[in-house]
Amino acid sequence: MTHINSPASAPSAAHPAYLVGYPPLTPVTDAAPVGDYDTGYHPPLVRKPVPATGAWLPGDDPGEREFASIGPVELELGGRIPDVTLAYETWGTLNADGTNAVLLCHALTGDSHATSKDGTDGWWHDIVGPGKAIDTDRWYVVCPNVLGGCQGSTGPASIAPDGKPWGSRWPEITIRDMCYAEKRLADQLGITRWALVAGASFGGNRVMEWAASYPQMTGAIAVLVSAAATTAEQIAYAKTQIQAVQLDPFFNGGDYYSQPDNHGPHRGLGLARELAHITYRCPTEFDERFGRTPQEGEDPLAGGRYAVSSYLDHHAYKLALRFDANSYIAISQSMITHDIGRGRGGTAKVVASLTMPALVVAVDTDRLFYPRDVEALADALPGSGPAVYVTSDYGHDGFLIENDQVTRILRDFLDDQERFTD
């Protein structure tokens, strides 16, 4: 395995307003306003009522989104979505022979906004852009919001044929359905083969499914902190988060869209986010950043919170402002059923058949996709070398935070003339 180290982060001189009362923090994690790192679009961090859904809806500011109607989608597990729209964003220019296209697959609560046209924001804006690791002067980069998502693509908050939100009637979808929808988008864009399909975590699951479902269309893959099939532990995490949402008294079986502010399932969604966020980070960070420090002005022995509790509450609130509870369930369920070997002779057989060039990246402190499992994936993929390591104090989220390391890793892979030629 290969390790790439980054310089230590400098301490922050100021405490962010939402979280105070403990030693100085690292600016990459705590500079205000704080992004979630897995999303590009996020609302201002000002206290306001929580809507019944944080989904993007027609009439909202589209930002830099584009929209493609791809028609009906027949689903793997049965059922049909009659008219699917995918929101997506692009950067760069597709060359004459269509050989320079890159597909980016976002994380679970991500969106299409990997970067902005001016390169100043987006969930991977340090990685994607002119002269950056995924150089948009060289590559035509496409990032769709996933089918079932809530940031412009058709999902449970979207209007069904009867004029009402899908809500509880939304059918179960799989990662294969998502990749099929993205394949239809690629067809519309005139892309017959991706030079690279790249993604991390849930996005990496889609990368693996793309390679298995459309190997002739997948020139190379970059799989960051992900897997070919979900583990029992990951299933347990996802099941618990789904149940947290469904047990919210305002969930109403998934039909909550007509409810006023503060009467949607935001508490259940927030609890799911808190549970997930614990798996995205690691004990070292929690111990060094928070320890047992109380939140300023609060006494944990008199009903108050510790600083780490405030931190989790903050992330719960942020997600509720920009995400939809039903989408969280639908996407989490697709992670539960993720297995590229399903119906194809088994996971190991399919992985062994994927001969395209592959980059596999682990984070040394990851406790959601354990390094040993990521190493095993790299060893099993015929086109991959040993897993490349990101060293991080931030756990699974290191793939979104340690941008200097990720830049070097991706540059080394994409600049290999044996794999990629201009």
Image: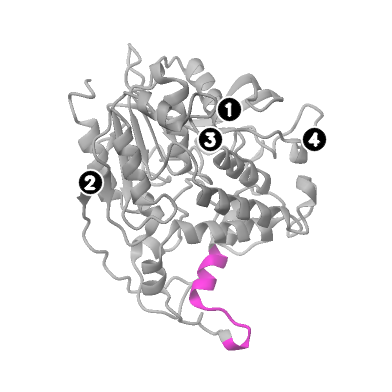
Q: Residues within 10 Å of mark 3 (few under 14, many from 20)?
A: many
Compare marks 1 and 2 and give the one earlier in the sequence.
Answer: 2
User: Could one spot residue 103 in this view of the protein?
Assistant: no
> Label 1 to label 2, Cα distance in Å?
34 Å
In primary-sequence order, the first of circles 3 and 4 is 3
Residue at (59% x, 41% y) in the render: 331
Which quadrant of the view contains residue 168? top right
Residue 139 appears anywhere in the view: yes
What residue did someone put label 3 on? 145
Marks 1/3 in contact by CB < 8 Å: the verdict is no
How many C-alpha atoms fall within 10 Å of the one at disc 1: few (<14), some, or many (≥20)? Answer: many
Tell me how far mark 2 sits from mark 4, CA to CA. 52 Å
Query: Between disc 2 and disc 4, whose residue precedes?
Result: 2
Residue positioned most to the top: 97
Residue 373, label in figure: none
State the CA–CA distance, disc 1 to disc 4. Answer: 23 Å
Instruction: Report which residue position mark 2 lands on.
Output: 1
- Which residue is the site of mark 4? 164
Q: Is residue 198 magenta?
A: no
- Residue 327 location (% of width, % of height): 64, 43
Amino acid at pointer 4: Lys
Q: State yes or no: discs 1 and 4 in contact (Cβ < 8 Å).
A: no
Gap in angstroms between the C-alphas marked 3 and 2: 33 Å
**Circle 1 is placed at which residue position?**
177
